[in-house]
Amino acid sequence: SPNAHVKSDELMYKVNVEGTKSMVAASQQSGVKAFVYTSSASIIHDTRSNLICADETYPIIMGKDQPQYYTTTKAQAELHVLASNRTTSYPDFLTAAIRPSAMFGPGDVQLLPPMLASYYRGQAKFQLGDNENLFDYTEITNIAHAHHLALAALLATNERTSAGGAIPLEHERVDGEAFLITNDQPVYFFDFARRCWAEMGDATDPKSAWALSRDLSLFIAFMLEWIFWLLRKGEPTLTTQRVTYACVARYFNIDKAKRRLGYRPIVSLEEGIRRGVRDALYRGVIAGQPQEYKGNAEI
């Protein structure tokens, strides 16, 4: 999947939607029995409203109601994958979707690098909003684990029905279903960032951080966007979208994954941060980082 911040709707659609459809068709035609799609928890979020303990009963938001076209394409692809489950033409082809929230960890190119770069810009001393908004993150090992659990469940269902057994009851089904996946450790938005910065050596006392109200932060971001647009300088680091995202509550109820998949996180938030930060420094993907950190396994 392309980075969610890539400014190309055409690329997003070709990869996320058309690419997924091609993989489904190829899988069906080649006799694949189980297909697990990597979706996103964002498909039930409009990026502005608070999500409090949201679950899979929440409606999918896309099209004109979804500010992020990337998220719309992820939703479209998920709908296609789940509609392809146990069809008349391919009754043995079973599908499921995993919806992770805010993925991070080794290999991360989207969440940790820009967050860690803000430390080198001296922004660890600032806070947007009151930091009372809980947010769910998911370490990638846990996401891979959830995919394995879904795959095992689909194959078990296929084996069961192929042997003449009944399909699973509604409350235990995995095929044709979507599952929200998180670290099951909601954390205040800026507390997560501070844990990441602390892993890099930051010793800033959170009580000394300069907290800008949400409204003031939005005003500053709005003015920066206009100035950058007038000067044709592209997009500023602080945007109204990023301010809104940093101040919104977004955490989930993952009971469905626990009951039907047997999912439990196997890497804690703290361990995930340690792994992710060290990996990002090692790969040298953080803007402003000391060059001696790149390729240094001793950090």
Image (cartoon, rainbow, N blue to C red):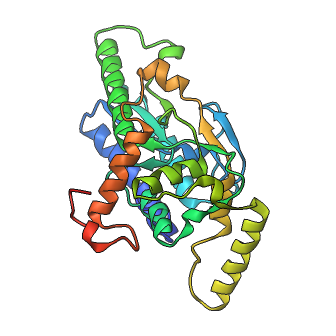
Q: What residue appears at the point 51 percent right and 71 percent down from the top-left corner?
A: 7
Between 81 and 240, the one lying in front of the other is 240
In the rendered image, is residue 275 in sight? yes
Image quadrant for the C terminus?
bottom left
In the rendered image, is residue 245 in sight? no
**Residue 76 in picture, x, y percent from top left:** 53, 49
Image quadrant for the N terminus?
bottom left
Q: Quadrant of residue 28?
A: top left
Q: Is residue 216 above or below residue 52?
A: below
Q: What residue appears at the point 64 percent right and 30 percent down from the top-left corner?
A: 57
Q: Is residue 73 above or below residue 126?
A: above
Q: Is residue 55 above or below residue 26?
A: above
Between 135 and 148, the one lying in front of the other is 135
Q: Is residue 151 above or below residue 15?
A: above
Q: What residue appears at the point 38 percent right and 43 percent down from the top-left corner?
A: 272
Q: What residue appears at the point 38 percent right and 60 percent down from the top-left corner?
A: 109
**Residue 172 in picture, x, y percent from top left:** 48, 15
Would residue 149 appear left or right of 238 to someone viewing this image?
left
The number of discs equals: 0
**Residue 152 in picture, x, y percent from top left:** 31, 24
Would residue 156 appear left or right of 15 to someone viewing this image?
left
Q: Quadrant of residue 250?
A: top right
The residue at the far top in this view is 165
**Residue 88 in picture, x, y percent from top left:** 42, 28
The residue at the far right in this view is 215
Q: Quadrant of residue 16?
A: bottom left
